């Protein structure tokens, strides 16, 4: 436990001091897990010592994790309603005390950034200032009933018992009811948001549409009614969805600071504090392990395909996304390997024709994604994409690469229609000639939307929301059905 001052002069106000908890109260996040993730990113090998630090007590663990951790205090998710209340109290010269179970070095960073705390009382590596320890220190400092207290969790009940006014912030409904929600000494601020909705948002279920690519080999082989093929592809779809969501969660945890500085990504569940970081730290490995286990049930080759996807996804998140062109080819691989995995799961391996078509198609879409980001950057008056390795000056050549890849994919489709493989596969292969123009229309539409600055999402996700893309897809599907059924008459 540590007492310190933040440089503010003592107030002459006669109001009792207002003591504010930090984790989960003033902040909608927990600094323990913030420092854990900071160590994971900068010095992951130190986390092997966590069990030994924990043997010396939770206060020691917090101190060790906080060593060298520099929080981006300006971007942290503060509780807006409470922050406004504190600013008003500071203007009225009321004493404001930051009382936190986090390590003193972390508490001091927050206090110095905000600049209105009279004192800081926090854990010191020996005493974990939480629950009854916090209540005891505050009673010794201000007397029983000599202070108001803002908290958020069950451990704060011991402090509320000895405080005058009780402010309940970001707390579950059960805490408010236990304190007596109608009591004049209880004030509720910022009721906790629905975490189930935040949990679902963290999974990014809308991105699962990309995983339908695992069904493409099955469809190309006309194995719609094969129970084994459909079951295998279905299980692979579930496995891929779980693994992809696990990777999204892990990326969100590792990109917290960058997301919080982004105009839209700051609203993501972990960046905004709507979902605790501790939930994400459990979610990521649970989703990844579940997906890989399902793939193992199908076959070892499916496990290898999904494992390769995971390995490259981790490499992409940590390094490859910063490398020009390598990042685009990696994105194309993420799509193509889904098709390959679907072939392994359904028992219908991907042909060279399908692999070539998918490779060029997804490479073009990957270039399109980068071009859409550059168009957005250009519209904001900026010249570079930060760590992505691209600038607005690269936009023309990237557009050329992407459009060329799109047209090559249609050329591969046209060559396939005229091949002996198509002759053997379809009763009326000539009907497939109509698929080329429809596909080309769709791709040209995506590139036109990108040039106009209308491509605000991933091209696959954009297409799932675009009625013209759905209509074009239906027309392509109709041509393949016609080719399968045979020439009329």
Image (spheres, rainbow, N blue to C red):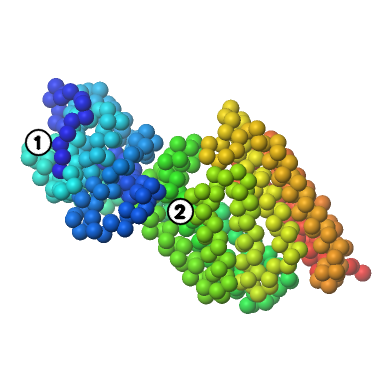
Tell me which corner region of the image, top left, top right, bottom left or bottom right, holds residue 49.
Answer: bottom left
Mark 1 crowd level (few <14, some 14–19, many ≥20, 10 Å Cα):
few
Earlier residue among tags 2 and 1: 1
Q: Secondary structure at mark 2?
A: helix
- Residue 273 position, x and y percent, is 38, 45
Res. 20 visible in picture? no
Mark 2 crowd level (few <14, some 14–19, many ≥20, 10 Å Cα):
many
Look at 36% across and 46% down and name the residue there.
Answer: 38
Query: Is label 2 or label 1 in front?
Result: 2
Res. 456 visible in picture? yes
Q: CA distance from mark 2 to mark 1?
A: 43 Å
Quarter of the figure with the C terminus: bottom right
Q: Secondary structure at mark 1?
A: helix
Which residue lies under the disc numbered 1?
Answer: 142
Please say if the residues under marks 2 and 1 sit with CB atoms less than 8 Å apart. no
Up/down of 34 relative to 294, above or below: above
Left or right side of 488 for 364? left
Left or right side of 71 for 61? left
Left or right side of 22 for 376? right
Look at 59% across and 30% down and name the residue there.
Answer: 383
Look at 73% across and 63% down and name the residue there.
Answer: 354
- Residue 461 position, x and y percent, is 61, 50
Quarter of the figure with the N terminus: top left
- Residue 213 position, x and y percent, is 64, 61
- Residue 158 position, x and y percent, is 15, 49
Which residue lies under the disc numbered 2?
Answer: 249
Up/down of 402 relative to 341, above or below: above
Left or right side of 78 for 291? right
The mark found on residue 454 in the picture is: none
> As rendered, which of 282 and 384 lies closer to the eye?
384
């Amino acid at each position: 436990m540590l007492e310190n001052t933040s440089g503010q002069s003592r107030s002459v106000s006669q109001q009792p001091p207002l003591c504010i908890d930090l984790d989960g109260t003033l902040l909608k996040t927990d600094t323990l897990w913030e420092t854990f993730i900071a160590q994971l990113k900068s010095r992951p090998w130190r986390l092997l010592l966590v069990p030994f630090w924990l043997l010396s007590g939770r206060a020691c663990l917090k101190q060790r994790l906080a060593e060298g951790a520099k929080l981006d205090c300006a971007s942290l998710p503060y509780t807006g309603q409470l922050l406004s209340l504190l600013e008003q109290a500071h203007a009225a010269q009321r004493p404001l005390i930051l009382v936190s179970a986090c390590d003193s070095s972390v508490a001091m960073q927050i206090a110095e950034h905000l600049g209105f705390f009279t004192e800081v009382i926090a854990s010191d590596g020996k005493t974990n200032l939480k629950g009854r320890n916090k209540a005891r220190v505050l009673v010794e400092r201000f007397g029983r009933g000599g202070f108001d207290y803002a908290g958020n969790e069950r451990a704060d009940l011991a402090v509320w018992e000895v405080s005058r006014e009780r402010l309940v912030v970001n707390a579950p409904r059960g805490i408010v009811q236990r304190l007596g929600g109608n009591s004049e000494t209880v004030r509720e601020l910022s009721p906790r948001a629905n975490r189930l909705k935040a949990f679902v948002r963290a999974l990014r279920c809308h991105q699962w549409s990309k995983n339908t690519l695992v069904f493409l080999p099955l469809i190309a082989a006309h194995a719609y009614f094969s129970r084994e093929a459909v079951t295998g592809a279905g299980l692979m779809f579930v496995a891929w969805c779980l693994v992809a969501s696990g990777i999204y969660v892990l990326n969100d945890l590792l990109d917290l600071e960058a997301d919080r500085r982004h105009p839209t990504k700051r609203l993501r569940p972990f960046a905004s504090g709507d979902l605790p970081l501790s939930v994400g730290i459990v979610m990521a490995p649970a989703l990844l392990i579940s997906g890989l286990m399902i793939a193992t049930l199908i076959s070892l080759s499916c496990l290898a395909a999904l494992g390769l996807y995971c390995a490259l996804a981790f490499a992409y998140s940590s390094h490859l996304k910063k490398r020009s062109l390598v990042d685009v080819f990696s994105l194309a691989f993420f799509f193509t390997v889904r098709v390959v995995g679907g072939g392994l799961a359904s028992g219908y391996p991907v042909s060279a024709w399908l692999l070539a078509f998918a490779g060029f198609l997804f490479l073009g879409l990957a270039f399109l994604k980068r071009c859409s980001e550059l168009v957005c950057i250009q519209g904001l008056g900026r010249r570079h994409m930060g760590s992505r390795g691209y600038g607005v000056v690269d936009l023309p050549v990237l557009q050329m690469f992407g459009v060329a890849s799109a047209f090559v994919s249609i050329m591969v489709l046209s060559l396939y229609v005229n091949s002996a493989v198509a002759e053997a596969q379809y009763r009326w292969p000539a009907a497939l000639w109509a698929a080329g123009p429809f596909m080309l229309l769709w791709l040209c539409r995506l590139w036109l939307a990108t040039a106009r600055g209308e491509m605000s999402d991933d091209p696959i996700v954009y297409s799932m929301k675009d009625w013209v893309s759905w209509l074009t897809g239906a027309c392509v599907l109709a041509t393949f059905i016609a080719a399968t059924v045979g020439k009329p008459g």
